[in-house]
Image (tube, grey):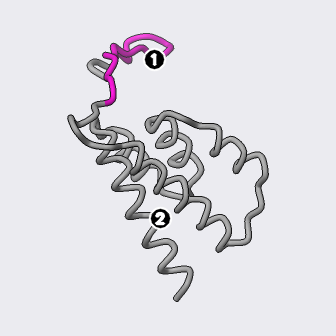
Amino acid sequence: MTEFHDDRAYLRASVSLVHPQYAPGEDVNALADTLRQRFLDLLDARGISALELRTSLKLLGSPIDLVFFITSHLPLDHYVKQEILEQLAVGEQIAQLNDILSSSMGTHLN
């Protein structure tokens, strides 16, 4: 958001479109596959069957779509979710989500 206007009975804002960034030479597809598998492992560890969720997850092909999907389904504080989604580099978003999932699995298993 570049500007916020509260001078009317309704809210208005000026926004600029930001495109996700992919680092040259970085294989985000491999990172995304790891993220997908860790999320599925977390669902298994918590005993969550969620067939629709699993099917949707398997159908996602784009790493950025996977980031959005998993972030929206994790039980995180909305400020943490926003922090993840505000990062421009998709590889960094995936790495942060992988760290969260790894620590969630470690917490669950201990």
Coordinates of residue 81 in the picture (x, y in percent): 43, 48
- Highlighted magenta segment, given as a residue range: 5-20
Amino acid carrying label 2: it is: Leu
Taking 105 as reference, is 80 above or below it? above
> What residue is shown with label 2?
101
Coordinates of residue 77 in the picture (x, y in percent): 47, 56
Coordinates of residue 82 in the picture (x, y in percent): 40, 43
Location of the N terminus by quadrant is top left
The image quarter containing residue 72 is top right
Taking 1 as reference, is 81 above or below it? below
Q: Is residue 13 magenta?
A: yes
Q: Main secondary structure of the magenta part?
A: loop
> What residue is shown with label 1?
11
> Which numbered circle lies on residue 70?
none
Q: Residue at 44% x, 36% y: name it.
A: 64
Coordinates of residue 24 in the picture (x, y in percent): 21, 35
Q: Is residue 17 magenta?
A: yes
Q: Single out the residue that lies furthest toward the top.
A: 8
- The mark that comes first in sequence, 1 or 2, is 1
Secondary structure beneath dot 2 equals helix
Q: Residue at 56% x, 80% y: name it.
A: 108
Q: Single out the residue that lies furthest toward the bottom.
A: 110
Secondary structure beneath dot 1 equals loop
Q: Residue at 54% x, 48% y: name it.
A: 70
**Left or right of 51 in this view: 8:** left
Count of numbered marks: 2
The residue closer to the viewer here, 22 or 17, is: 22
Taking 90 as reference, is 19 above or below it? above
The residue closer to the viewer here, 16 or 26, is: 26
The residue closer to the viewer here, 12 or 57, is: 57
Q: Residue at 41% x, 43% y: name it.
A: 29
